[in-house]
Image (tube, grey):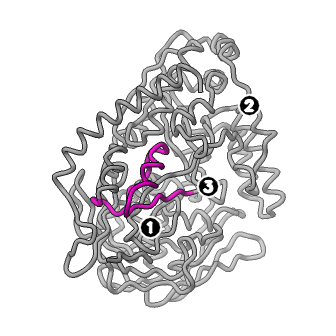
Amino acid sequence: MTGITRRLFNTALGTTLAAGGLSTGILGSWTTPAQAQQGGASVVTVATIGEPPTLDPVGTTSDLVSIITQHMFETLFTFDGDWKLAPLVASALPQVSADGKTYTIPLRSGVTFHDGSTVTADDVVASLDHWTKASPRGKTVAPLVESIAAKGADAVVIALKEPFAPLTALLAMNNGAAAIVPKSVIDGPGALKSLIGTGPYKLLEHKPDQYIRLVRHDAYASPAGTPSGYAGSRKASIGEVRFVPVPNAATRVSGVLAGQYQFADSLPAETLPRIKGAAGVKPVIVKPFGFPLMIMNTKTGVMANPKMRQAVLAALEPNDMLLAGFGDPEFVQAEGSIYAQGTPYYDAASAKPYSDHAAGKAAELLKAAGYKGEPIRIMTSVQYEFLYKMSMVAQAQLELAGFKVDLQVLDWATLLQRRGDDKGWDAFFTYHTFVPEPSLITVLNPSYPGWWDSPAKREALAAFNREMDPAARKAKWVTLQSLFYSEVPSIKVGEFYNLAASSDKLTGYTPTPWPFFWNTDLKG
């Protein structure tokens, strides 16, 4: 870690801890016992990084939203513990025609919505049609869809204009989700009229900036099978799951240690020894988890110039950013390949520019780009403390290379809203959780903020998505990753592992990128 990085890290940590003291006083007035009773049922209180911008799972790819809404809404398919596809609302994986264009999806019988009505093929058709119009993921599929139709009462058929290998993986994702909802709650491509799903929990109450209360759906029809990842049997033993927005990381740590929360997500890596040494609490480390990203606006403004983006890549020192963000090198890996070593899509050669960085090279690229000192507006948030620390280091490194940086510190909900305005920013910090299918990576989606959509990328992505053979797909993925590093729509900072904490009274919890609380219980 360089001297400037170390100073920035210590300053950020001190600021955060000071803010944590203030936040504890504000939030400490509302407490929940470790096993509070609500109508005779146990309550698990979960501290999240903040208030979600919506509880509609279709229109956003926010992880914060999907952590909560996956308890309420379900998709046709999901992923098991090995990241293989498994049926959820569907009764089996789809039958795919020999030409790869027709998917026949059988539905489970007896699945009910939270309003008591039974899921029909017409509901599924309406839900999928809504997904193609309202979801950033669904919109990528929409141009390829010939038709979506019911086949009798217990099956749906999706006909495509050409083969599209990622379809089932897209249908399985829990954000930008193809959520199955009643046809009656859909009103065009806008938000759902009511938050009614098929999940093991249903919405009871939402007080913004205070809590979201989900209660058990007593008529829930679980899929069969041994629990594995997000797949298999789902049992709602906990009567209520209460999500509390706690924007400050220090407050989440102190709250879970005090027994105020039974689970706290996204904690600073340097707090691991404190959690390990506390009675009644255990650390939860998720590995693999994800990779931080600096997304750049390829559509409008100064970063629409590819040479400017190449200059950013040359200026940044990813390892310094990772160490500033997490402190503990055991939680990070400086890895440029979008898929890390040990995964099927790993490729080091096409990610070589990740390591080719120098302030002098960045200055040359800035000169070639015709940069005139315009402020680079970078959005970040202290709610994800590691992203905030990384953005501070990035600001220092970019300024050293000759950039003028306007670092804008926002709450996470505001950042999510503002990133949709292509004229309002030049870059923002976020992260992406591990996904088994490359086409699920949001930066590949031309409708995702950043709007990477060059002709070369469009052609390469289409070729990758059409390819059904796994070996051939790997070669086409290398072409895509090469374009990622030549056109630089985003900067992959590296790999990181997530730290959370759980009460030892919470049993049955499975560490996953998007925490879920079915198949868990409280003891004592």
Mark 3 surroundings within 10 Å by alpha-carbon count, few (fewer than 14), some (14 through 19), many (20 or more):
some
Q: Position of residue 476 (x, y in %)?
A: 79, 50
Q: Residue 365 lies in what quarter of the image?
A: top right
Range of magenta residues = 259-286
Q: Nearer the viewer, mark 1 or mark 2?
A: 1
Secondary structure under the numbered disc 3 in the rendered image: strand
How far apart marks 1 and 2 lie (CA) works out to 37 Å
Mark 2 surroundings within 10 Å by alpha-carbon count, few (fewer than 14), some (14 through 19), many (20 or more):
some
Q: Position of residue 72 (x, y in %)?
A: 37, 70
Residue identified by numbered label 1: 516
Q: Quadrant of the N terminus?
A: top right
Q: Is residue 271 magenta?
A: yes
Q: Is residue 165 magenta?
A: no
Mark 1 surroundings within 10 Å by alpha-carbon count, few (fewer than 14), some (14 through 19), many (20 or more):
many
Q: Is residue 114 above or below residue 49?
A: below
Q: Nearer the viewer, residue 165 or 430?
A: 430
Q: Is residue 321 above or below residue 256?
A: above
Q: Mark 3 or mark 1, which is nearer the start of the sequence?
A: 3
Q: Nearer the viewer, residue 39 or 92?
A: 39
Residue identified by numbered label 3: 288
Q: Mark 2 or mark 1, which is nearer the start of the sequence?
A: 2
Discs 2, 3 touching: Cβ within 8 Å: no
Discs 1, 2 touching: Cβ within 8 Å: no
Q: Nearer the viewer, mark 2 or mark 3?
A: 3
Q: Residue 296 lies in what quarter of the image?
A: top right
Residue identified by numbered label 2: 353
Q: Report the amino acid beneath label 1.
A: Phe
Q: Is residue 480 above or below residue 393?
A: below
Secondary structure under the numbered disc 1 in the rendered image: loop
